[in-house]
Image (cartoon, helix red, strand yellow):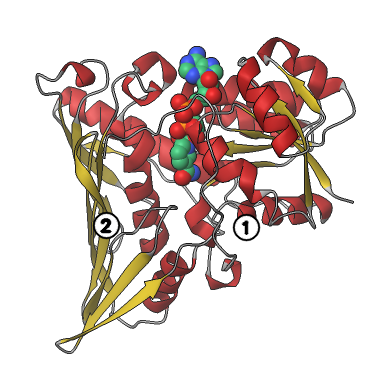
Amino acid sequence: MKLRFAVVGLGHFAQVAVLPAFRHAKKDCELVALVSSEREKLESLAPRYDVKKTCDYEGYDELLRSGEIDAVYIALPNSMHCDFALRALNAGIHVLVEKPMAASVEECEQMIEAAVRNDRACMVGYRLHFEPANLRTLDAVRHGEIGEPILFDSVFSFQAKEGNFRLQKDLGGGPLWDIGIYCLNAARTLFESEPEEVFCFAERSEDSRFQEVGRSFSCTLRFPRHRLASLQCSFGAADVSAYRIVGTEGDIRLEPAFDYSGELKQYLTKDGRTSMQTFPKHDQIAPELIHFAQCVREKKVPEPSGREGLGDIRIIEALLESADSGRAVKLGEFHRNRRTGIENEFRLPAQGKPRTVNVASASYN
Ligand code: NAD
């Protein structure tokens, strides 16, 4: 039985990454419905992907009750994730939601509770949990190739385009929510633990783009076992997507580290020698779809779960509190007993670059 999906929101990411991925996931998933307020997108994309059912956001609840879909892929602005997920879960529909899971801890908790109460799956779209370069790095760290991991350092930045939802506070915009979350998730994943205390500086700049959400964030996180992470993200700087994990005996740098539209490169330095490995562009979305469908079929909780999503949002809230107060913020205990690993590695060929309808990428670069 294939899992029948509706994709909700036909923005840039849905069009360039999510819709094409259904081709690689066709053994497990079927794209059966599209939801958007823009008729032009529906009329152009539905025939291209052979989708019979389309509706606008007003028709969403009826679609959920129609018996024609089993799951939704939510690719809407961040502030809308929770509402659209709750409506789906309460109608008995499984949810795969884009990162960040939601716009607050409270919203994440509501989604987790609704998934449990309705016995439905709720997974967060952290595509790098299935991505070879990131998983090989995690595996090398786990196997002690750089000794004991001590420091993590990461930068993610680009020039955000005026008018994009990422620059609007009420739509859940802001660099920490959109890209800082990648640095944060990589630190938690590679250290296999949760930070105990965080500090954050935020800078706005005079640029009119950054009056609501700030331009740059610089964060320090203290992890258990005397480990430190430093994360920087910006919507007003050139394209950088990188991290480095430094151990007692060597270090691994990934640069680019977080992209889905090009190759990723890993540099392992040990005993004064650096080896480089290139990971070609892969389809990073189909693995999520396939894993999600398999978990639903086997009645397993899919990872990255709602709890994994919540794990980042609680830290982002603490970082924002720190930026406001000018003080370090302590975090309570939070346990994750499942993390990703090399067993989740998928290597699917890259998708082509589809023609887009009425969307613009988030970046000027
Ligand atoms: P986008 O602005 O291109 O698309 C947003 C979509 O939401 C559009 O179709 C828009 O019409 C629709 N929408 C509905 N109500 C809206 C409203 N009130 N205001 C603005 N738009 C509204 O954004 P995107 O880049 O496609 O991002 C969508 C989601 O996907 C976000 O949650 C983002 O974090 C996530 N995303 C994930 C990745 C990844 O690599 N996993 C990459 C890019 C985006």
- Residue 129 position, x and y percent, is 51, 58
340 relative to 118 in the view: left or right: left
- Residue 305 position, x and y percent, is 60, 46
Element under disc 1: helix
Vertical placement of residue 209 versus 259, above or below: above
The kind of residue on which mark 1 rests is Pro
Quadrant in the picture for the C terminus: top left
Element under disc 2: strand
| Rendered residue at 50%/37% (across/down) | 13
In this rendered view, identify the residue nearer to me: 322 or 280.
280
38 relative to 331 in the view: left or right: right
| Rendered residue at 24%/46% (across/down) | 239
Tag of residue 287: 1
| Rendered residue at 52%/34% (across/down) | 356
* Quarter-of-image position of residue 333: top left
Tag of residue 242: 2
